[in-house]
Image (cartoon, helix red, strand yellow):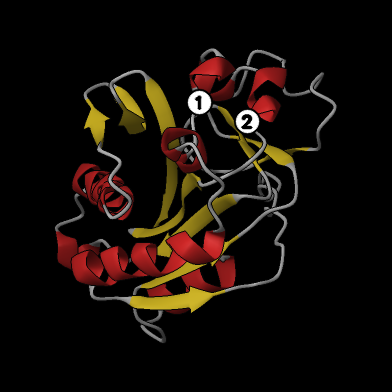
């Protein structure tokens, strides 16, 4: 991810979306958490993205958009809304209505259930980190801490909303189509489980 960020800053690659599936892990953003992540029994990785703690694991599509915001007016808020729209359009293809809620980052179903988390970082106006869409993960993992500083029981998945099992292979093509339609950018698939990279140590 960071290599792509550096390459994008140098103009060596186009805007790119990397999509992966992580092994079970909690990532903690710059806003931290209430200590629940440390006692969850899961591996915890601190990262540079915005937001609090969230869970990544099998059955979840995690997207890392590497996008230069310079030609997009350096508008971080618009970029986040566009990411949320990509997820919402993906879900609409399955008949699930999802939306952004003012003051509540992420993508929500029915105004109460969070189906995707959003957390980005920006380096010299190039974005990294991104979104995590719950396709069919172990939702019980969210109950082992306070994801996004809220009750984990509020998390949902596409499988729960549809009442059936859903595979990543079903969802990935719709996600890619929604991404390409909104960003006209490259897509890099990955079938290998990927571990989130920790934040680099602070420089003195």
Q: Is residue 44 visible?
A: yes
Q: At which x and y percent is residue 29?
A: 56, 34
Q: At which x and y percent is residue 64?
A: 48, 59
**Residue sitting farthest toward the left:** 73
Q: Left or right: where does residue 164 sit relative to residue 94? A: right
What is the count of numbered marks? Answer: 2
**5 versus 58 height, above or below:** below
Q: Left or right: where does residue 62 sit relative to residue 192? A: left
Q: Nearer the viewer, residue 36 or 156?
A: 156
Q: Residues within 10 Å of mark 2 (few under 14, many from 20)?
A: some
The image quarter containing residue 112 is top left
Q: For residue 155, which numbered disc appears in the image?
A: 1
Residue at 53% across, 51% down: 166
**191 versus 110 height, above or below:** below
Q: Nearer the viewer, residue 113 or 27?
A: 113
Considering the image in quadrants, where does the C terminus appear? top right
**76 versus 38 height, above or below:** below
**Residue sitting farthest toward the front:** 164
**Residue sitting farthest toward the right:** 41
Q: For residue 62, which numbered disc appears in the image?
A: none
Considering the image in quadrants, where does the N terminus appear? bottom right
Q: Left or right: where does residue 40 sit relative to residue 202? A: right
Q: Nearer the viewer, residue 25 or 45?
A: 25
Mark 1 touches mark 2? (CB < 8 Å) = yes
The image quarter containing residue 167 is bottom right
Q: At which x and y percent is residue 38?
A: 79, 23
Element marked by disc 2: helix
Q: CA distance from mark 1 to mark 2?
A: 7 Å
- The residue singled out by tag 2 in the image is 139
């Amino acid at each position: 991810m960071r290599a792509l960020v550096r390459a994008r800053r140098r103009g060596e690659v186009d805007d790119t979306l990397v999509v992966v599936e992580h092994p079970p892990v909690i990532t903690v953003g710059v806003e931290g958490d209430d200590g629940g992540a440390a006692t969850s029994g899961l591996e915890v990785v601190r990262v540079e993205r915005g937001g609090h703690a969230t869970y990544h694991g099998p059955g979840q599509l995690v997207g890392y958009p590497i996008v230069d915001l310079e030609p997009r007016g350096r508008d971080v808020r618009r970029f986040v809304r566009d990411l949320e729209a990509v997820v919402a359009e993906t879900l609409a293809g399955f008949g699930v209505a999802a939306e952004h809620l003012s003051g509540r980052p992420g993508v929500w179903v029915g105004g109460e259930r969070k189906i995707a988390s959003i957390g980005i970082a920006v380096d010299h106006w190039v974005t990294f980190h991104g979104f995590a869409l719950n396709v069919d993960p172990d939702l019980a993992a969210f109950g082992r801490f306070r994801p996004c500083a809220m009750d984990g029981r509020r998390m949902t998945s596409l499988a729960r909303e549809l009442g059936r099992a859903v595979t990543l292979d079903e969802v990935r093509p719709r996600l890619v189509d929604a991404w390409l339609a909104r960003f006209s950018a490259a897509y890099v698939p990955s079938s290998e489980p990927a571990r989130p990279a920790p934040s680099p140590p602070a420089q003195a």
